Every structure is written in structure tokens, then in C-alpha cells.
Image (spheres, grey):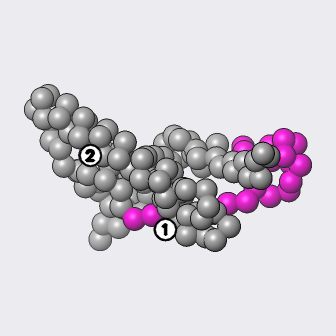
Amino acid sequence: MKNEYKPLNFILIDGTWSNSAAMFNRLKEKTKSVWGVEDLPCISLSAGVSTMHKLRPQPSWDRTCTAAAAIGLLSELQILPQFSSYGLDKQSEVLENAVDVLLDALTARRLRMGRSITRRLRPSGNIR
């Protein structure tokens, strides 16, 4: 029996926000030579605040960690009819459970070290 599925390839950039922007720009430059396409197709996720926001501050509430972005990607793709047969919802759930386990472990570690387990608010650039 022949596998009818074509592989799905996604690039999730893992780094600081400024480093990620630089990596993305370099990636766009290399797209033509590597894949032979002019533009790198991109999607924007509508992922909300991840559980990791409780522990690890992000530059703003609409930004998230790489693991949460992967969960959002899998969840959103599952909704599309052309991807519904891939079982991405199950993969999303597995990844989300792993992030929950990680959050529990990091929280326990912070408590053992006597550190705060709540997200510190970063100063906003909108000071009036």
C-alpha cells in the first residue's frame, strides 16, 4: 500500500524575538536557492495566551513561546478540511500535555528555590 500523504513541512523559529526576526529575514533570502520559490509562505496564528506565560515572560501578551506556537499551529490546521485526516488534534493534545508537565516541573523547581511563580509584568513603552 502506497502512502498518499505528502509530507507537511513547517519552520518554527526558536529564539528571542529580535533574533527570530533576523533569522526569518535570512530564511526569506535563502528560500529561492533552497526551495526554488520567491516567497516563503507564512501563516499567522490566532493563538491566545499560553500556559507558559504564567512562568516565562514574553515581550507582550500576544507573543508566545515556540511550544505554544506549535500547539496553535497543529490546532488551527486540524480545522482545515485538507488537514483533518492527519490527526493533528491528537498531536496538539500530546504537545499541550507535555507543556503542562514542563510548566509543573518548572513551577516546582522555582518553589524549591524560593522564587516567584507568577509572571512579572514588563514595563510598557506606553508610559505617559
Upstream in the sequence, badge 1 or badge 2? 1
Q: Nearer the viewer, residue 17 or 14?
A: 14
Q: Secondary structure at mark 2?
A: loop
Q: CA distance from mark 1 to mark 2?
A: 21 Å
Q: Position of residue 53 (x, y in %)?
A: 31, 52
Question: Is residue 2 shown in magenta?
Answer: no
Which amino acid type corresponds to the residue marked 1 in the rendered image?
Ser
| Residue 36 included in the magenta stretch of the image | yes
Within the image, what quadrant is residue 22 found in? top right
Q: Is residue 12 above or below residue 89?
A: above
Q: Quadrant of the N terminus?
A: top right
Q: Quadrant of residue 106?
A: top left
Q: Which residues are magenta?
A: 26-48
**104, 114: nearer the viewer:** 104
Residue under label 2, please give it.
Answer: 55
Look at mark 1 in the image and give the residue it sits on.
Answer: 46
* Image coords of residue 5 (percent x, y): 74, 52
Is residue 65 at least partly visible in the picture?
A: no
Which structural element holds mark 1?
loop
The percent coordinates of residue 92 (x first, y second) are 46, 53
Q: Residues within 10 Å of mark 1 (few under 14, many from 20)?
A: few
Q: Quadrant of the C terminus?
A: bottom left
Q: Position of residue 24 (x, y in %)?
A: 66, 48
Mark 1 or mark 2: which is in front? 1
| Horizontal arrangement in the rendering, residue 24 relative to residue 79 (left or right) | right
